[in-house]
Image (cartoon, grey):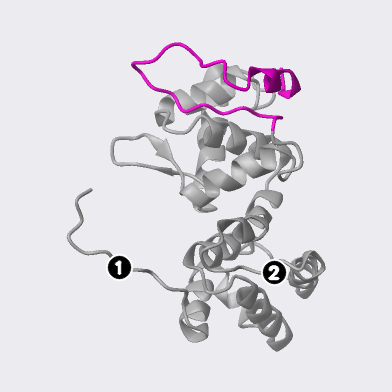
Amino acid sequence: MGASKKIKVKCLELDEAWVLFKHNVNLAVIESDEKLKKIAREVMNKCGGLPLALQVVGKAMSNRNTVQDWEFILSSLKISRTQVVQGVQESLLPILKFSYDTLLRNIQECFLWASLLRWLSKEGLLKLWIGLGLIGDFVNLQQSYLQARYIFNILEKSCLLYSSDDDYVDLHDAIYEMAVWIASDCGMNKNKWIVKKYDMFVVEIPSINAENWRFANE
């Protein structure tokens, strides 16, 4: 972009991280109980001070209002021994996945398709969801369109997708990497989905590593 100066964005200090985290969760809930507040701070610590993780995890937990809910996510983080390491994006993926795990199954599928086919127009994405049968049962197309918009709003509020000023859909690069990671069975089956960036001037799909195609989903 021709920037005249590059600034390295460091992880937030604990106090700064806590401010950002509280901004994204339901503050009234975590302030209502000292035990819950303590657990919330431990969850926040697992985000390693990275703003994206603090924002996404906070949004994912914003509708969780019991000590049991917060104990569960903290326990899951401890069991997985997940630790966010600055500069190592792979360490961020399991943390971000909690936002995906809180979604209903059909919304998870909508998110994956939106991620793997990024930079569609918003209208195009909603029509794609409907065409793929991801919206579920509906009486007419107007109802399905309203349901698709509702799902998009959920994903946008979860900080998983956003629409640009020209009404195209995109997502943070780390969220995109998370989507590809999830689609490949959390990295265990890297050939399950084969993603090739689209170039409007190139219509031929290269046959490099074509032998891996047989492992991909039909």
Q: Secondary structure at mark 2?
A: loop
107 to 145, vertically: above or below: below
Label 2 vs label 1: CA separation? Answer: 38 Å
Horizontally, residue 70 falls left or right of residue 138, namely right
**Which tag, 2 or 1, sits closer to the chain's start?**
1
Residue 154: tell me if it is visible: no
Horizontally, residue 36 falls left or right of residue 142, namely right
Residue 65's disc is 2
Query: Which amino acid lies under the numbered mark 2 shown in the image of this protein?
Result: Asn
Residue furthest out toward the bottom: 34
Residue span colored magenta: 191-218
Read off the residue under disc 1.
7
Residue in view at x 70 percent, y 37 percent: 184
Find out whether the residues at labels 2 and 1 contact each other: C-beta distance under 8 Å. no
Residue furthest out toward the front: 208
Give the quadrant of residue 112: top right
The quarter in which the C terminus is drawn is top right
Q: Secondary structure at mark 1?
A: loop
Residue in view at x 64 percent, y 64 percent: 61
The residue mark sitting in front, 2 or 1, is 1
